Amino acid sequence: MKKTLIAILTLSAYIVSSYAQERTADVKRIEIEHDASVTVLSCNPIGDKGLILITKEKDKQQSAEKDYKILTFTKYDTLLNKGKSVDVTCLDKMYGGEITENGIIYWMNNVKKKNKYEVLLFDGEKMQSKVISGELEAKTYTIHEKLVGDYLYCYGSQGDTPIVLIINTKTGDKNLVTLSVTNKKKAKLISFEPDEKGEEVHAFIKDKEESGYMIKFFTFRDGKLDKKYVFANEENGKFIESLYASKMDDGTYIISGTYSDKERGTSTIGIFLKKIDNGKTVFSTYTNYLDITNFTSYMSKHKQEKVEKKKEKKAQKDKEYTIKYNMLPYRVIEENNNYLLVGEAYYPTYVMKPYTEMVPTGNGGMTTKTTWTMEFDGYAFSHYFLINFNKEGVIEWSNAAPLSVMKTWFPYFRHLSISKDTKSLDITYPSFGLLNHISYGYNGEELKKEDIPYVGEEQKLKRYYSLQSQFWYRNNFVSSGLLKIKDDDGKRKIYSINKITFKK
């Protein structure tokens, strides 16, 4: 297999900020020659330990047994120097799971025989793999797997009862925890997310009780169910639609998400922030999307003016004007007793497509008939927002900006990578062959917006696939993707990995 690495130091973009100092964005790039014999599956940052590139090489599959595949895990350090490579054999149908700062997990359920599972754990620091297998009880299935510390937490069901299967990755021992719900038919999982900083996994379930819908918040720690909190789904006519939790250094929880004005709303009208201390609510803050600075900046000037006029008319009647959105919120980022909340707005798109069929003519013959139908064409993302709350839940500043990204078939992929500290807030995301970078100041004002190329000045980008941007560590990001380029060597396909460092 041919694989050539080319290290290129390419860009130094100077940014003048309100901090009375210059910040520079330095980009270091490596290129991996790509051909049909190698499939790049993912580029996985593992903090300051480096990153892991996972590939599937065609030549190696000949030595794999039936129903198995061989994956190659290659380590790169934080300077993008290539290190050790390890070949790992796993089930062919096994799929990638959680990526953590310690490594990567792959998971497969119901393989070989009924209710058998296999888990592949790869330690990115030690470059070692481990396979754990076992049996699930009858009628038990899992749908979400999260790795935190030495435990793998798998959300699923046993019959119609929600459960969390917990597997000790050192011993292979497992523990099945039943989640208590009142109405098994109407109970709905809202989110199941890891909190690596708090060393926990959080599950939110919406459950129907006699008094109405309730939110049940379960926390898992050290391989067992740790805490359970219950609070109402509705508060002053506002109904919670999405929830995520972050554990703070003082042991409290900041819960964030979106809300609707209807009990079964499909779109939302705002975001909320709730702080819980020992099961008690310290504060609940609800914010109308239209109260976020520049939230309608993605609209034309004419539409923005119409929205403002409608807001004024509603305000004169002491009412609130709202617009419904589909929103993908993030978990809260804590920094210096402040809470940053981020979200991306999206909407479904449709196209008209012809459908041709043969129909009888009435005289014994057949003819063609064409009808036009609306067909789903993916989700488009319009804009994103930033809100900074103080420790009392009061908004210190907010901002929003248009989001220029490609459509996705599932609205679960977050595009923004965020680095925040007391001096800066930097955001990157891939945007049609370029890496978009936006820098914000102390009060949320946009300081700089620039496009960082995925290729060098002497190269021309012809096509691009699977572009992504991820926060790596401290003030570093990593962006990667499969590119088709043209340079002095002609047209080539490469896999490009870029380290972007924002110097303070």
Image (tube, grey):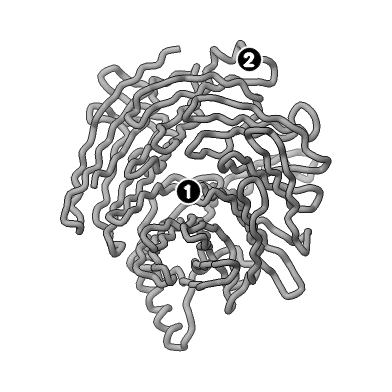
Q: Is residue 363 above or below residue 491?
A: below
Q: Is residue 147 visible?
A: yes
Q: Residue at x 42, y 32 (%)?
A: 51
Q: Would residue 413 be found to the left or right of residue 152 on screen?
A: left
Question: Looking at the image, is 126 positioned above or below residue 327?
Answer: above
Of the pair 131 and 69, the residue shown nearer to us: 131
Relative to 131, 36 lies left or right:
left
Residue position for label 1: 414
**Label 2 packing within 10 angstroms: few (<14), some (14-19), many (20+):** some
Tag nearer the camera, 2 or 1:
2
Location of residue 391 (image quadrant): bottom left
Quarter where residue 311 is shown = bottom left
**Circle 2 residue:** 64
- The kind of residue on which mark 1 rests is Arg
Q: Secondary structure at mark 1?
A: loop
Q: Position of residue 101 (x, y in %)?
A: 47, 39
Q: CA distance from mark 2 to mark 1?
A: 35 Å
Quarter of the image for the N terminus: give it. Answer: top left
Residue sitting at the far right: 138
* Image height of 154 relative to 487, above or below: below
Q: Nearer the viewer, residue 144 or 277?
A: 277
N-terminal of the pair, mark 2 or mark 1, is 2
Amino acid type at mark 2: Ala
Residue 355 image-quadrant placement: top right
Q: What kind of element bears circle 2?
A: loop
Mark 1, other Cα within 10 Å: few <14 / some 14–19 / many ≥20: some
Measuring from the top left, give residue 296's x and y in whole percent: 38, 65
> Which mark identifies residue 312?
none
- Viewer-nearest residue: 250 or 211: 250
Position of residue 364 measured from the top left corner of the image (x, y, whole percent): 80, 40
Q: Is residue 504 left or right of residue 51?
A: left
At x 35% / y 69%, what residue is drawn?
Answer: 396
